[in-house]
Image (cartoon, grey):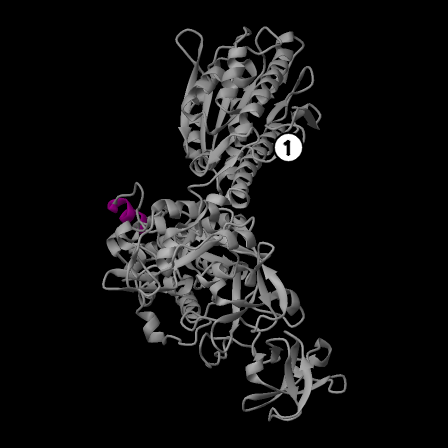
Amino acid sequence: MNYCGTDIKASRSIWSGKAPWVVFSDQLDNFSYRKPTGKNVYKELKFMEPYLVIKEKGDWLKVVKYCPDIIKDGKLVNRKQAQYYGWINKSDLLLTQSSITDLATGLKNKMVTVLADSTVIAVPDKYFKNDSIRVFQDTDFMQDYKKVAMHTIVYPLKESDNGDKTLIAIKSYISPDSVATETLGWIDNALIRNIGQQLHVDINTLPSDRILFKDRYEMDTVTYGKESLQESEVLEHNEKALLYSPIVSFKHSNSFSSFRTGAFFPLTDYRNSYILNVDGNPITYKQFKGIEKQLKQINILFVMEDDNEVARQYPGIINVIQGLQSRFSHPQSEFTYKFGAVLPTKGHVGNHVETIALTSDYMELLNALSDRVDTANKLSRNSTNHNWKSLRKAINMLENHKKETNVIILIGETGSGSEWAETALVNKLADYNCRLLGFQLHSGRSDKYTNFVLQVENMIDSYAKQIAVSKREKIVYADQLRTMNEYNEVKRNIYCLDFPNRSMTQGWVVFPSKDESMPFEGLTSSVDSLIKQVENDNRSVASSLRKAFTETGNFRNRIDSTFIQFHRMNKPSTELITHSLKSVSPLYFIPAQTVQIPDSLSSYVDYKLLLSDAEFKKLKNFISQLAGFYVDYKYDKNQQKGHKNQICGCPDDVWLLKNVTTTERMDSSLNNEYASTRSVRRKLRKLYYKNINAGKVHRLKRREMKQLSLADAHHLIITCPTDNQFLKSYKIAELKRRKELSDETLDMLIDYFKEKKKKLEQAAGNTFKSNGQTYYWISRDMLP
C-alpha cells in the first residue's frame, strides 16, 4: 500500500498474500546493478518498465523482468524463462501499484490539473504544448512522455526527492500489463492541486463571513468578488471535475465543523475584452456573460388546443408528459428548465383556455395537469375552428422570457381556416425566441386537418428565417451560418428542420396518415430529440463565444487581480500564457483559511462526494446492505398488518411520522407484534464494525465503535457529514437493545435506508468522464 509520507505497511485485511510484488522504474535512464552496491552497472531501465521482486536486501531489490507467464499464485514458477535484471535501488523504483493513500481514511488521494503556482505563467512553454500540460519520463524534464488536459483528475504515485514534481496516473491502481496507458508521467507540482479524497462543498452555500483568503505567505487578506466564483462556475460546467470546492481536512468538535477548502478562479480577466460577431458588431465580455446565462435557461410549454381528440386522449397525453420527467432530472445539468402548460377547460358557456404558470418543479406541473383530468372529460366536443387560442395564450406567457429559449410542444388535431399562419402570430414566435413542435393526434379527410400540418409548417418556416437573422448577433464563426432552412424526414410523417446541417434553428411537425391517429411514441421521441437539438445549439453558441474570447479577444485581457494579490506579483502580461493555451481558459486554485460552521448552520451547507467508479460501487454496496434487512410482523391470520410508519425523505432528514399520532402508533404496536429482530440487529452492528475499519491502518477497537453514534459511523464510512438528528441520537451499541431502539423504530430506520438506496440509484446515470475514467457527483441528500 502506498501511504502518503510514511513507510507504514498495510494491514493484512487490505493486501492479498498471493499478490506478486511488482515494481516499476520510476524514470528514464535508471540502471540496475550486478550487486547491491551500486558500483557495477548491469542494465539500463526503461521508464515504467515493470519488474518482479525475487529478493530484498536493505535498500536494494533483486528483480526479473515482469511477465505474467512466469508467475503463479504470486510466485516465480518458471525461472528459466525469467529475464534477470540484477539489483535496483528502491529510490529508483515505484514500489507499489497503488496511488498514494490517505493514512486516516484509507482512501486514495485525488489531484486535479490546475494552476497552483505563479511560476507557470512566466515560462509557459516549459509546461504547456498544444493546449495541454506536458508530462515527462524523467524528473529533469528532458524527455517528453505524454500530454494531459487541464482541469482533469489524476492520481499521485510518487513524489520526487525534492518534492516539487509528482509521478501521476489516470487510475488509482496501475496494472503491469497496462501501465503504459494508465501512467501519465512526471508533472510539475505547480500544475496539480491536491483535492483530498472524496468530500467537497458548494462554496456558494457557505456564509460569506466564514470564507477568508490570505496571500500565499498568510499575511494579507486577499479580496475576491462573487462574480469571480460565478465565472469559474460557468467554466467548470465544461470541466465537471471542478464543479465544487475540495475539502482536504474535516473535523467536528464542540458543536462546530472545521474544514480546509479553497476555490477555483479563472486566471484571465476578460472584462475589458470584446469580440466581433459575423455582422462586424462588437460583443463585450459583459454581454457574453449575459448571453451565456440566457442560453442556459430553457422554458418548455405543453400546449393543448381545444380539439375533440385532445379531450378524449387527455390521460394519455399526461402519461407521455410524465414519462419525460427523467429527461430533466439530472442535477448536474448546465441548463435550468422551467415547465408550464396551456389547456382547454370547461367554462360556463363553452370551453375556455387555462394556463399553468412556469415552474422549475416538474412534479408541480404533473400534479396540476393530473388534477384537470376530470375537467377534460367534461369538455364540450366542438367542430369549429379554434384559431390557435391555446398557442396564442402560451406565447403571451413568454413575454417576460424573450431572451431565453422557449420550446412549445403544440398538441392538437385541426387548424384554422387557412393554409397560412397569421403573420402576427409568427412574428411573436420569432420575437419570443420560440421553437415549435406540432403534434397532430388524428387526421381526418377534411381540410381543417390538413391545415394543422400546413400552418405548423408555415409557422416554423417563417420564424426560422427571422431567428436566423437575429442569431447572427451571437455568432462569431462563419461556419455556423446557414443560408437555408430545409427539412429532414426522420421517420414516416415525422419531419424536422435539418439542424445543424441545413438550418440554424429547430422545429418539428409530427402527423398521422389520413383517417389514422398518431401513436404517442412519436411524441415522446420527438420531444426528446428536439430538446437535445436545443441543448446542443445553445451549448455550441456559448462554447464558440467562449472560444473566441480565449483565442481572439485577448488583446485586452488581464491576469486576474486575485491571482496577483495571492502571489504578491507585479502585473504580469497574459501574452505568453495565452499563446501556450490558445483555446483553454485556465483555472487556478487558492486555499481558504479554516472554515468553521456552527451546527445551527450546517444543514444549509451543500456537501458533495466526488467518487470514482470503484468508490461509487463500494458506497452503493454499503447502502444496499443497510437497505437489505427486513423487519416483519408475526403472522396472525385473524389480524391484518397495520399501518407501517415511514420516514420522510426530506433534504434535512428530520424524522417525521406522517399523519400518525402517538396513539395510533401505540395501537399499531399492540395490534401487530414484531417477529424477532435479534438477527437483524446483530447483522446490522456487524456491518457497521466491518465497514468502519475497512481499509484503515489505525483501526478502532470494538468498544470504541460501540460508542459511536450512527451519524458518526456513517461519516467514517461514507466520508460525508450528516445532520440527521435521529442518527445522532442513537449509538451502535443501542442497536442491540429494544429498550433503546424499539422494533418499530428499527423498522423505520431500515425503510429510511431503502429510500436512500433509491435516491442513490438515480445518481447512477449522472456521470462524467475525466481522463477516460468515470466519476460521480453525489449530493448529501442522497446519503443516509
The answer to whether residue 607 is seen in the rendering is: yes
198 and 752: which one is in front? 198
Magenta-drawn stretch contains 650: no
Q: Which residue is mark 1?
A: 500
Read off the magenta span.
662-669
Q: Is residue 407 left or right of residue 40?
A: left
Residue sitting at x 47%, y 79%:
11
Any part of residue 634 in sight: no
Q: Position of residue 607 (x, y in %)?
A: 38, 54
Locate the C terminus by quadrant: bottom left
Residue closer to the observer: 7 or 619: 7
Which residue sits at x=62%, y=11%? Answer: 451
Q: Residues within 10 Å of mark 1 (few under 14, many from 20)?
A: some
Q: Residue at x 36, y 76 (%)?
A: 701
| The one of 683 and 223 positioned closer to us in this rendering | 223
Residue 758 on image: x %, y % = 47, 49
- Please tell me whether mark 1 sits on a helix, a strand or a loop: loop
Using the image, determine if residue 247 lies above or below residue 540: below
Residue lying furthest right in this view? Answer: 80
Q: Quadrant of residue 87?
A: bottom right
Magenta stretch prevailing secondary structure: helix
Q: Residue flagged by tag 1: what amino acid is it?
A: Pro
Q: Position of residue 555 (x, y in %)?
A: 49, 44
The answer to if 665 sits in the magenta stretch is: yes
